[in-house]
Image: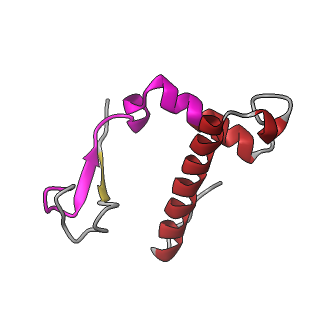
């Protein structure tokens, strides 16, 4: 059985906006991971490995292409922003 979950809109924090059709919430009816492209999944995996000190090439950051480094920076920036939002809302997140 598939269950859905309603969450406060991350864009407006429950106040209502264009993203949530002015409801202040959105409902997840399937795994959000299923909406990711294979390239996005790979980038998230590389970013996680880089955060843990394991770049995909033995030489570390010097051997990475600028696109790879930029992708990792983007993922980490979005992650930091999300964690800051959770802290502001009093929520908790696991690393």
On screen, residue 24 versus residue 50, left or right, reads left
- The residue that appears at 56% across and 47% down in the rendered structure is 75
- The residue that appears at 44% across and 34% down in the rendered structure is 33
Which one is in front, 79 or 26?
Answer: 79
- The residue that appears at 48% across and 23% down in the rendered structure is 38
Give how far across and how far down residue 52 sits, in percent. 77, 45
Q: Which quarter of the picture shows residue 10? A: bottom left
Give how far across and how far down residue 77 sits, in percent. 56, 56
Give how far across and how far down residue 30 sits, in percent. 33, 34
On screen, residue 28 versus residue 53, left or right, reads left
Total numbered labels placed on residues in the image: 0
Part of the protein shown in magenta:
20-43
Q: Is residue 39 magenta?
A: yes
Q: Which quarter of the picture shows residue 61? A: top right
Q: Quadrant of the N terminus?
A: top left
Give how far across and how far down residue 9 sits, in percent. 29, 60
Q: Is residue 54 visible?
A: no
On screen, residue 46 versus residue 56, left or right, reads left
Q: Is residue 90 magenta?
A: no
Question: According to the image, what is the colour scheme of the structure?
Answer: secondary structure
Given the current orientation, which residue lies at the most extreme right position? 59
- The residue that appears at 50% across and 26% down in the rendered structure is 39
Q: Is residue 41 visible?
A: yes
- Rendered position, 65 above or below 81: above
Q: Quadrant of the C terminus?
A: bottom right
């Amino acid at each position: 059985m598939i269950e859905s979950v309603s969450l406060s809109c991350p864009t407006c924090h429950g106040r209502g906006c264009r993203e949530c059709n002015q409801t202040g919430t959105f409902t997840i009816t399937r795994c959000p991971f299923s909406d990711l492209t294979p390239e996005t999944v790979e980038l998230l995996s590389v970013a996680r490995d880089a955060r843990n000190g394991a770049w995909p090439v033995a030489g570390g950051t010097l051997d990475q292409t600028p696109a790879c480094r930029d992708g990792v920076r983007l993922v980490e920036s979005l992650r930091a922003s999300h964690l800051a939002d959770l802290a502001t809302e009093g929520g908790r997140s696991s690393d």
